[in-house]
Image (cartoon, rainbow, N blue to C red):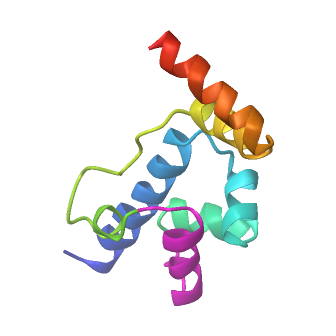
Amino acid sequence: MNIQKIRKELGSRIKTFRTKRGYTQEQFCEIINLDQSNLSNIENGKTFPDIVTLYSIITNAGIEPDYLFGYTDDDGVKFTPLDYEIFDLIVKLPKDTKMKLKNIVELLK
């Protein structure tokens, strides 16, 4: 596999992961601490991410290294953007409210 193909594949995997999670480039850049022009260049296969950026993508964004490097086609996305929005709201609730919500959800399922 040539270097250009590797860059394009890596960028494509990052973009697919980002879009399946429902993030804009701007939102994703905030998560991984990168400016938008650099992310655009990575996603378009123009440049490789440096090691710090790779580490941030893996740890801060939660992308699976096996998917990122092409060892699997499963990108690990198990939740929709709505799921993440709900999670963000739940995290901010007090513990007693979370327990009540848990009981309600158990009744609904």
Tell me if residue 86 is in the magenta stretch: no
Q: Horizontal and vertical percent for residue 104?
A: 60, 18
Kindly identify the residue that appears in the image at 32 percent across and 72 percent down.
Answer: 6
Asked if one can make out residue 74 in the rendered structure from this viewpoint, the answer is yes
Q: Horizontal and vertical percent for residue 20?
A: 49, 40
- Residue projecting furthest to the top: 108
Quadrant occupied by the N terminus: bottom left
Please tell me which residue lies in front, 10 or 18.
Answer: 18
Asked if one can make out residue 89 in the rendered structure from this viewpoint, the answer is no
> Against 104, is 75 above or below?
below
- Which image quadrant for residue 83? top right
Quadrant occupied by the C terminus: top left
> Against 39, is 28 above or below?
above
Disc tally is 0
- Residue projecting furthest to the bottom: 51
Kindly identify the residue that appears in the image at 51 percent across and 13 percent down.
Answer: 107
Relative horizontal placement of residue 62, taking residue 3 as reference (left or right): right
Relative horizontal placement of residue 27, taking residue 72 as reference (left or right): right
Q: Horizontal and vertical percent for residue 32?
A: 66, 69
Relative horizontal placement of residue 48, taking residue 56 as reference (left or right): left
- Which image quadrant for residue 37? bottom right
Kindly identify the residue that appears in the image at 73 percent across and 72 percent down.
Answer: 33
- Which image quadrant for residue 95? top right
Please tell me which residue lies in front, 63 or 102.
Answer: 102
The segment highlighted magenta reads: 46-63
Q: Horizontal and vertical percent for residue 29?
A: 71, 62
